[in-house]
Amino acid sequence: MNDTDEQDTGLPRDAARIALTDSAAALLRSLREQHGPLMFHQSGGCCDGSAPMCYPAGEFRTGASDVLLERLAVDGVPETVGFWMSADQFARWRHTHLTVDVVPGRGSGFSLEAPEGVRFLIRSRLFTDEERARLGE
C-alpha cells in the first residue's frame, strides 16, 4: 500500500471526501445485519437522484460514468462501504466535503433504508485550503 491508493480511490491516507454522522453509521450497521455488505451511489438525477442511495454491495452496477469517492470504514461493519457518484455530479461537487446523515421521512423506494421511515441525506461544505491541498486539488 502506498500513500495515494490505500482505499483504491486515489486519495492520500489523511484525506477524506466523505464522513458519516453517528446516526448514519448506526443505520448502516442495522442495514448490514439485514442485507449483508453495502454500497452507496449518488447519481445527481432528478427527484431522489441527488440523495445517496444505499444498496446491497454490487446490486447497483457502476461503470465508467461513475467515480468511487471513498470506501467508508464503519465501526461494527466488517467490510468498507463504497460510495460512488456519477462523474457528472462529481465534476460539480469535487470541491465539497460530504457528510452522510439520516433524517426522518421517506426517500426513494429503491434505497434500503426506505422501509425504516428515514432517509439518507447529504450535507455539504466547501473544502478548506488545507483539505484541498491534501486532496491534490
Image: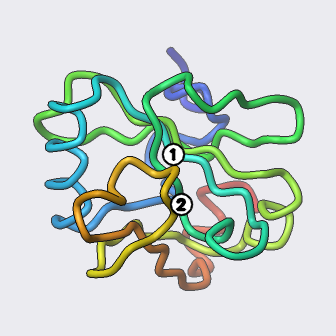
Tell me if label 1 and label 2 are in contact, CB under 8 Å: yes
Which mark sits nearer the N-terminus, 1 or 2? 1
Residue 15 on image: x %, y %: 50, 53
Q: Is residue 115 above or below residue 66?
A: below
- On the rendered image, what quadrant is the C terminus found in? bottom right
Q: Secondary structure at mark 1?
A: strand
Q: Which residue is mark 2?
A: 52
Q: CA distance from mark 1 to mark 2?
A: 6 Å
Q: Which residue is mark 1?
A: 40
Q: Residues within 10 Å of mark 2 (few under 14, many from 20)?
A: many
Left or right: where does residue 77 sit relative to residue 76? Answer: right
Q: Residue at x 54, y 71 (%)?
A: 97
Work out whether residue 77 or residue 135 is closer to the camera in this orientation and state it. 77
Foreground: 130 or 103? 103
Q: Residue 21's spot in the image, x, y percent?
A: 25, 68
**Amino acid type, label 1:** Phe
x 30%, y 38%: residue: 73
